[in-house]
Image (spheres, rainbow, N blue to C red):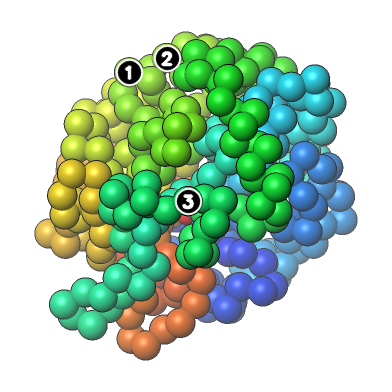
Amino acid sequence: MKSMVKMTFRWYGDSDPVTLEKIRQIPKMTGIVSAVYDVPPGGVWSMESIAALKKKAADNGLEFEVVESVPVPEEIKLGSEKAPQLIENYCENIRRLGKAGVKCICYNFMPVFDWLRSELEHQQADGANALAYDDAAVLAMNPLESELSLPGWDESYSKEELKELLTRYQDITEERLWENLKVFLEHVIPVAEKSGIKMAVHPDDPPWSLFGLPRIITNEENLERFLKLSDSPANGLTFCTGSLGASKDNDLPRMAKKFASRIYFAHLRNILRTGDRQFEEVGHPTDCGSLDMYGIVKSLVEGGFDGYVRPDHGRMIWGEHGRYGYGLYDRALGAAYLNGLFEAVEKDFK
Ligand code: DNO
């Protein structure tokens, strides 16, 4: 029996120390998840760059059907007067990606900062190191003086620009952010429909407000509200277990089942909650952390999920050095484990 889901692997382009030659050797790997990295957020990606990515993947027997991410510029999240033109640029990217055969676009709607961690090389008992998060440590940091370089920290802003941006967000309540998201979806979703693309919003990581900035893609209620903003099947979710699972209030198997038909991309990884708003990243299997990975996969399958899956952040093991969260070895172990879970669950279910 062939699995309904497609296992994929994130690849950061030619500068990624994990090569396509290595990725293709991971059993059952069908494709890469990537993006055009040489255009700043808000710009239009050239057809040549998109085609080049596709060709590199194909030359290695891999598909390129998932983009992560087409970033949403801050002006769109702020709903400024620059938003309409930038939304049109975003739509143009969707059209172009659709033409190139991309089927799913992952994006997020987190103001200013993407994913955040307080520690990049948290030592673990077995000698591995992994990303970790402690809310108190993060809040004690001043983003304007960021003494630490965090993976989700946008380094393209100067201190002045960041300051101005944070000031502009002072008026953006959660409700305003919802309104701006609605406007974005109203324009983007019809274009995605016509282009054969499923849009899959990524949850906020961690799923709570930071530095006073609103965060709304955080829990079951809000995911439901999000899906209702547009009922189109082109409007869907990236189900990132590590992001949503950082909050103990999120019941992931329940959410996976409830939203399965609108989940187009699953980022499956485990985390270990070590305190209130405190966690570290661990190996993918259930026993390594706080999340019921089996229960999540079972719920996805039972709910009819047939989208893309990727192992998510891995620890650094076997002496590997690389892009934090995105080394080869632990993510490959994660893919193997997830393939096993899907095979077992799908067989039982049929
Ligand atoms: C972190 C990733 C995020 C994700 C974006 C999606 O490892 O999951 O950076 O790609 O939030 O837009």
The image shows residue 97 at horizontal and vertical percentages of 74, 42
Residue type for callout 3:
Asn
Q: Is mark 2 within 8 Å of ligand 1?
A: no
Q: Could you tell me which secondary element the residue under label 1 belongs to? A: helix
| In this rendering, the label closer to the viewer, 2 or 3 | 3
Inter-mark Cα distance, 1 to 2: 6 Å
Residue type for callout 1:
Glu
Is the residue marked by circle 2 packed among few (<14), some (14-19), or many (20+) residues within 10 Å?
some
Q: Earlier in the sequence, mark 3 or mark 1?
A: 3
Residue at position x 19%, y 37% in the image: 248
| In this rendering, the label closer to the viewer, 3 or 1 | 3
Q: Is mark 3 within 8 Å of ligand 1?
A: no
Please indicate, yes or no, whether residue 330 appears anywhere in the rendered image: no
Q: Name the residue beneath numbered marker 1.
A: 221
Q: Name the residue beneath numbered marker 3.
A: 142
Inter-mark Cα distance, 3 to 1: 31 Å
Asked if labels 2 and 1 touch by Cβ distance under 8 angstroms, the answer is yes
- The part of the image, by quadrant, that contains residue 112 is top right
Q: Name the residue beneath numbered marker 2.
A: 225
Q: Could you tell me which secondary element the residue under label 2 belongs to? A: helix
